[in-house]
Amino acid sequence: MTGVDFGVLGPIEVLREGRPVRLAGARQRTVLATLLLAGGRVVPVTRMVRLLWGESPPPTARTQVRKQVAGLRAVLGADRVRSGPDGYAVRLEPGELDLDRFHEQVRRARAARDAGRGVEAAATLRAATALWRGPALAGGTPELVDTEAPHLEELHLAAVTERIAADLDLGRHGQVIGELTRLVQRYPLRERLRAQLMLALHRSGRTADGLAVYREGRAALSAQLGIEPGNELRELHRGMLTGDVPLAPTPDRPAEPPPCGRPAELPAPEPDLVGRTAESDAVRASLTTGRVTVVHGRGGTGKTALAVRVAHALSGDFPDGQLFVDVGERDPADVLGRLLRALGCAPTALPATLEERAARYRSLLDGRRVLVVLDDAHAEAQVAPLLPGSAACAVLVTSRGRLGVLSGAARHRLGPLPAPDAVELLARVAGPGRVVAEPAAAATLVARCGHLPLAVRIAGVRLAARPGWTVARLVRRLDDPDRRLDELVAAHLDVRAVLARDHAALDGPLRHALRVAALLPDGPFAPAQLACALGVRVDRAEDLAAALTEAGLLDQVGAAPAFRLDALVRADARRRAGRRVAACVTRDGRPGGDDTAPARPGLTRRWCPSSAS
């Protein structure tokens, strides 16, 4: 996947990683659209000139075309537009152009219809027509629109007509009357649309209204073209008068399962998401080569924002829909109920048990290309029942933990931002002028925030709300580690609350180990230091440190095993450590016992930090 999407089914546009690429005016958009519509074939310069200026091009027309092509190469990459014999061609990867995706979905829908899968055919045609974002080729020159748009709009109308026919075959006559009424008003001479509206009205018990639609159509054809309605319209009219047209479709095959909706549940992308290009590319690659991808890391690193951005960028690869659900600590049966309703199941038709719901979910997704985003999953047992059985689907999971038992999943850890990206995020939220005026203070501020995206965002919000503050003033307020978390709060954004959820996700020994590690001297520490402080064996301390690293609460540094806490995690864990109690050591000073064992007679004691209630 390249991360680039081209659009001509609406305003001419280019998206890179879901973000618009700026195109320089109608002429550049017209040159791009002309190359895209050629599907990789060389477009002669003479054709571009005609679509740019019509029959009266300026003497400099060829030079201006070359300039527009040079501009496209600058924004798309030099390898994207190649020169050919007296013309140019664009290089497209499969699925990058919305028109190509439209043709592929129409092909799939017709294959499904021919195989007797009417529900699938209707849903796929609905997905195809949903690719239209407005009038085709909007933003191009009038010559381009007049020449090329009518053909594209004809393709759109044909697909809409096919989809309505599929809906009528499924007995959905009541659902299409409003849409057909608008279409007939817009295209009064289209006899097939008029026939569909007559049939839908007749099947809805409104035969008189259907006959009136016929009379209006006959009058329009006579007045504008001087002809009578065609055979299809006349036969339908006769059948409605005689009662030969049934009030319901007559199935020629067993009834199909209830219709499966096409969900589009992705939240809006985070507008201030900064950096993460390498991570986004890695996650995209995983989703295109495997079924399950896990993005894991501590709270506040932006896992959800990255997952949503990637999901939007890949939405064209999953034309049957995108599901999004906040898993949290919910029971998987409840989550499945939520997903089944999104796929069109009536609440009263939901199966009772987890096993039955999982089976229905897999059945509804069988053969469909759907992206499922499971946000903030806590355990493998939650995720396993939510995995589709179809290899055409993909699943993107965000979690604080690695979900290491989840078989066959690709895993990507998300950590704090690199310092330059953290400063850029601060500038976007607080305003670039604040950062430009105090670059050193801005760098210190994001360091005080541990380069954690959530904390940096909160700092930016606080600065934006206080235009009289300097960046240095907020740095001074964050200097005291004991007050730092109190400062990193803005409305519903709260670093302390996120750290509390991270802490709550740990079991007892891991919570205790984190609190003890926070009370060690600042800087990297070896497992032996943690073992001594805990009063446990070194291999036990290594296991605890490794588990905390997987949870994103410790960072491993250096080639030899050594670990470090960032400032925010340390501040929170120290607050939680609270009081100090004795940990057991043996007579010869070697660690012994576990971190929660009571004192035993005959053992010496050392004062070490322990957990608070």
Image: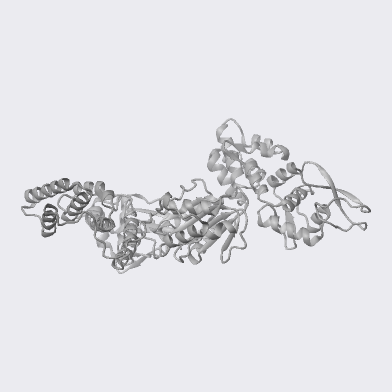
Is residue 68 shown to the viewer in this render? yes
Residue 385 is situated, as x and y percent measured from the top left of the image, at: 53, 59
Pick out the residue farthest to the left: 226
Using the image, determine if residue 147 lies above or below residue 486: below
Residue 16 is situated, as x and y percent measured from the top left of the image, at: 44, 55
Left or right relative to 325: residue 568:
right
Identify the colour scheme used. Answer: one colour
Left or right relative to 606: residue 302:
left
Q: Which residue is drawn at 32% across and 53% down?
A: 132
Q: Nearer the viewer, residue 315 or 263?
A: 263
Q: In which quarter of the image is the C terminus?
A: top right
Q: Residue at x 53, y 56 (%)?
A: 277
Using the image, determine if residue 67 lies above or below residue 216: below
Left or right relative to 95: residue 496:
right
Q: Nearer the viewer, residue 351 or 436?
A: 351
Is residue 280 shown to the viewer in this render? no
Residue 424 is situated, as x and y percent measured from the top left of the image, at: 56, 46
Q: In the figure, residue 551 lies in which quadrant?
A: bottom right
Using the image, determine if residue 400 lies above or below residue 474: below
Q: Nearer the viewer, residue 359 or 567?
A: 359
Residue 391 is situated, as x and y percent measured from the top left of the image, at: 46, 66
